[in-house]
Amino acid sequence: MNRRLRLIALVLTLTGSAQAATLTVWTHFNDAAETKWLKGQINTYSKLSGNTVNLVNVPLDKIVDQLLKTAKQGKGPDVIVTLPQDRIGQLAQAGVIEPLTTTSRRSEFDQTTVRALTVSGKLYGLPMFAESVALVYNKKLVPTAPTTWADFLRVAKRNTDASAGRYGFLTDLSNAYMNYGFFSAYGSYVFGGTSTLDVRDIGLNNSGGSKALAFMNDLRFKDKLVPAGMTGDKIKSAFLKGQAAMIVTGPWDMGDIKKAGINYGIAAFPTPPGATGKWSPFVGVQGVVLNAYGTQKPEALAFAEGLVTSVAQLSFNQAGGRIPVNLGVRIRLSSNPIVAGFGRVISSGTPMPNVPEMGQVWGPWSSAVDASVQKPAQNYASLLDTAVKTMQKTIK
């Protein structure tokens, strides 16, 4: 009997009920391959447990509101597959999702993804897949990834000829999310705290934040690597045409890069000059969560844990290409450059804050980041101080 079957058998024994349960599972999956995978997991669970699973498709942008409206009335789902971490804090504060104190799989996951789904020291979801940005490079132009800033700058400049439309390095300098790794490298942060985030401790306007903006400004005006107007779409287009040697992007662009036949590599961005830490970009995680008002929690947990076993994680990657969070599966897929490359960056990344107050951060922070690269040699401290004061006025 395999581990998954033993788990389900144990759950049925502990519940002491011979009556089959009926679970309701909400999902936002709309990719055909991933939906097929999920239905296959449901069929396996039903055959092993004798329980029935009703699968309901709910758009991602509707799940939170519908759960808040229905959970306490006993009309919501038993399990949600999946929720992004940036909604976990709100739902945990509302008391509608279940802290998973009994899960046996915590040690199998990349711990960065565990922290992403943890609120006030409690785990509120089983990590299922993750993403971050990384340095993606064209091996025809850059045979090996530069590991120091000096090597990076040399390689980038060697491949740059703006008059000919060739660029050694491109990133969207106006995008706060894409450039958080620079802030983290210089010791800046969004919210302080460890197991519990302190939303009153905003570290974006410390000295490290100013150094990050100065570095980004240098990429444009001093080093002359990243011209104005480089949006995500333009950057990807340049890379697909072989006009950009190195870019910062995420797994969402790898399908098009593979189709273009580019021999690519994926690595972490090297430590910026004078930084006190390593480049650690934001990590986004989606996890399987349970309804706190569900009446069939043992069965729901058994189903949820079945979705994140090593066997399930492996087949899920094969279905849709998502970056698995199970460390054993990453080892098995070590020859897959996308899994290996992004997996390493995710492990050293920073979980994006999962508290509702993050919603008050994005606007002012993004405005400061965008303004910082519009002209050379600006007052970066003033830009960030203004942004943080705006955040503090709206964060209660």
Image (cartoon, rainbow, N blue to C red):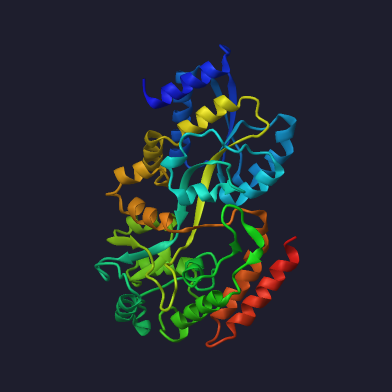
Query: Is 12 drawn above or below residue 222 in the view shown?
Result: above
Query: Is 371 drawn above or below residue 114 in the view shown?
Result: below
* Residue 395: percent from left, percent from top: 72, 62
Q: Quadrant of the C terminus?
A: bottom right
- Is residue 268 something that shows in the picture? yes
Camera-side residue of 194 and 54: 194
For the view shown, which residue lies furthest in the top direction? Answer: 18
Q: Residue at x 65, y 70 (%)?
A: 364
Determine whether, in the image, residue 210 is placed left or right of residue 226: right
Q: Quadrant of the N terminus?
A: top left
* Residue 361: percent from left, percent from top: 64, 64
Q: Residue at x 51, y 81 (%)?
A: 214
Query: Is 345 drawn above or below residue 38 in the view shown?
Result: below
- Is residue 322 something that shows in the picture? no
- Which corner quadrant of the image does residue 27 belong to? top right
Q: Residue at x 42, y 58 (%)?
A: 348
Camera-side residue of 183 and 200: 200
Camera-side residue of 29 and 175: 175
* Residue 182: percent from left, percent from top: 48, 71
* Residue 324: percent from left, percent from top: 41, 45
